[in-house]
Amino acid sequence: MKLVTNEPLIKRNARIGVVAHLGGLAVLIAGMVVTFLLPKRSDLSLLALMTGFVLANVGIFFTNRWGRRPRPDEALDAALKGLDDQYLLVHFRLGITHALIGPSGVVALVPKFQGGQVRYEGNKWRHAGVTWMRRFFAQESLGNPSLEAEAEVASLTGKLRKILPGEELPPIKSVIVFTAPEATVEAEGSPTPAMHAGKLKEYVRRMPRAATLRPEQLAKVLAAIGE
């Protein structure tokens, strides 16, 4: 499998995560100090607590995607290791986070790092098995992975249309991938295929051949992203 990764973006965003996280914690501590030392200045302590909370959450967002090891791109690399050179895995370079191009078509991969038990049930995603402290301080909420997948497909389609104006594009598919080792996934009935990373390579290998980017189109795409 061939890999294309945006290393400068990863390093920059990892630094942002560290700075925002540490800065948020520092401001939160400052807000607590103000609360004790200047009880009459509740406005300052409230402002500090709100600012610290926002910074800390920005730090969590960036750290989970670009600072946590293995990063989502590294987890996908490991999950798909062993695929032959018919496949190209692109990270952070085509208007979305991760795209797999191969004999089965073009696939937007949507990694989710949440651990615990994940189920698709009654047209809703449900997440359990994670303590409130971890959910508050270390994980974002699960959100709606299906909507994220739709957005990634739309973004990738738009990027390819800019690179290949007027050309016929293959349908863009999507797969939701849970990368946490301890995650369990029950997603029968999900509008978007979803699975643990440990099952991804076999799923890709079993995908039927489908319309994909032609060699000349792929060459234009790689040239457009500087490869």
Image (spheres, grey):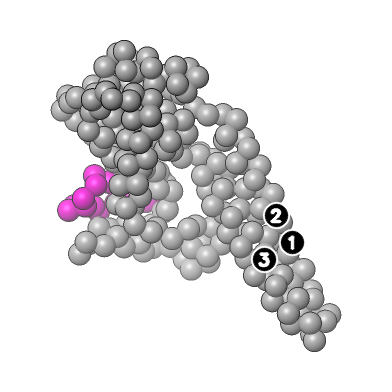
Q: Under tag 2, what secondary structure?
A: helix
**Quadrant showing the N terminus:** top left
Q: What x and y, as percent, mark residue 32?
A: 74, 74
Q: Quadrant of residue 118?
A: bottom left
Name the residue located 26 percent from the left edge and 62 percent from the top edge. 124
Q: Quadrant of residue 161?
A: top left
Marking on residue 1: none
Q: Which residue is mark 2?
A: 22
| Amino acid on which the number 1 mark rests in the picture | Ala
Q: Which residue is mark 1?
A: 26
Q: What x and y, as percent, mark residue 187?
A: 23, 52
Mark 1 neighbour density, 10 Å: few (under 14) some (14–19) many (20 or more): some
Write the start and end of the magenta stretch as one range. Answer: 181-194
Name the residue located 70 percent from the left edge and 54 percent from the top edge. 22
Marks 3, 1: nearer the viewer: 3
Q: Under tag 1, what secondary structure?
A: helix
Name the residue located 20 percent from the left edge and 64 percent from the top edge. 122
Mark 3 neighbour density, 10 Å: few (under 14) some (14–19) many (20 or more): some
Q: Quadrant of residue 42?
A: bottom right
Residue 152 against residue 89 in the figure, above or below = below
Callout 1–callout 2 Cβ contact below 8 Å: yes
Closest to the observer: 171 or 187?
171
Q: Which residue is mark 3?
A: 51
Q: Residue furthest right?
A: 37
Residue 9 against residue 59 in the figure, above or below = above
| Amino acid on which the number 3 mark rests in the picture | Thr
Apparent side of residue 174 relative to residue 69 in the rendered image (left or right): left
Q: CA distance from mark 1 to mark 2?
A: 6 Å
